[in-house]
Amino acid sequence: MKILIVAAHPDDEILGVGGTAARHVENGDDVYALILGEGQTSRFDRREDAGAEIVGRLHDNTRQAAAVLGIRQVFFEDFPDNRFDSVALLDIVKAVERRVRELAPQIVYTHHAGDLNVDHQRTYQAVLTATRPMEGQPVKEIYAFETVSSTEWNFAYGDAQFSPNVFVKLTNGQFIKKREAMEAYQTELCRYPHPRSLEMLEAVARRWGGVSGGYYVEAFEAVRILRE
C-alpha cells in the first residue's frame, strides 16, 4: 500500500505517527510525508526575519528523521508557520490534492481537528476537502493523530476532544526508531516535562499501551474508512 502522512510542521509527522510509519515500512508499504508549513518562522517577530538557512536546516532534520523510519520521500510546502489562517484554505487544499493525485495513497494520516494549533486545524480541513470521497478517489482510510503540545493543550470537550478508537501496537524496535527520528530534530526537542521531550514521547506511548493492552502504542481517531 501507499501511505501519506500530511503534517503541518516538521516533527509533527514523528510525534504523531512515527512508530506506525516504521511499522508500515517493515510491512512493505511505501510511506510518504507532506510537510505543509515551513516551521520555526513564527518564533521571530516577522516571518522575513528568519533566514533561509533556518528553514533549510529544519528540512535537513526532516530528511534525516525520514531516513531513520524508512520514509521514501518527503515533500515540502512553504505555508507560513502558525499563520495558516492567513492563507486561503483553497491554496492548502490544492497542495494536498497535488500529492494525492501524484501518489494515489490508500491511507492518509493527519492532524486532529480539535488541536489548539491553528495550522493543525487547517491541515485537517484541507485533507478532508482534498480527499472527499468522489469516484476515482484513491484514499480509502483517513486517521487523525495526536500531536503532543497541541492536542492535549486545547483542553477540549465533546467533539473537539481527541478520542482515539484505533490503537497500533509498536515493537520495541519500532518505538526506538521513532525516538531516534525525533532526536534528529534538535531544535524542536525540549527538556522534560515539556511534551516534546524524549521522556514524554515514551510516556505517551506507554499511556496508550496501558489503555489498549500493549506496551508502546500510537493512538488514532478513524475519520473515514471506505470498504469496497
Image (tube, rainbow, N blue to C red):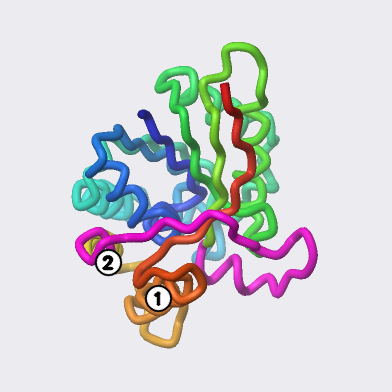
Q: Is residue 164 magenta?
A: yes
Q: Which residues are magenta?
A: 147-175
Q: Is residue 197 or residue 173 the one in the foreground?
A: 173
**For marks 1 and 2 on the same chain, the one whose residue lies earlier in the sequence:** 2
Which residue has dot 1 on it? 206
Helix, strand or loop under label 1: helix
Q: Please, which residue is most extreme toward the top here?
A: 135
Q: Is residue 22 or residue 147 the one in the foreground?
A: 22
Q: Amino acid at mark 1?
A: Arg
Q: Residues within 10 Å of mark 1 (few under 14, many from 20)?
A: some
Q: Amino acid at mark 2?
A: Arg
Determine the residue positioned at 38% across, 73% down: 201
Quarter of the image with the C terminus is top right
Which residue has dot 2 on it? 179
**In the depicted structure, whether residue 78 falls above or below residue 100:** below
Q: Please, which residue is most extreme toward the bottom here?
A: 193
Side of 222 relative to 56 (left or right): right
**In the depicted structure, whether residue 158 falls above or below residue 204:** above
Determine the residue positioned at 23% across, 66% down: 172
Place of residue 142 in the rendered image (x, y in percent of width and height, measured from the top left) = 56, 39
**In the depicted structure, whether residue 206 falls above or below residue 193:** above
Q: Please, which residue is most extreme toward the right here?
A: 158
Q: Residues within 10 Å of mark 2 (few under 14, many from 20)?
A: many
Place of residue 150 in the rendered image (x, y in percent of width and height, measured from the top left) = 58, 67
Helix, strand or loop under label 2: helix
Total numbered circles = 2
Query: What distance separates the C-alpha of mark 1 from that of mark 2?
Result: 13 Å
Place of residue 168 in the rendered image (x, y in percent of width and height, measured from the top left) = 42, 56
Give the mark toward the camera: 1 or 2. Answer: 1
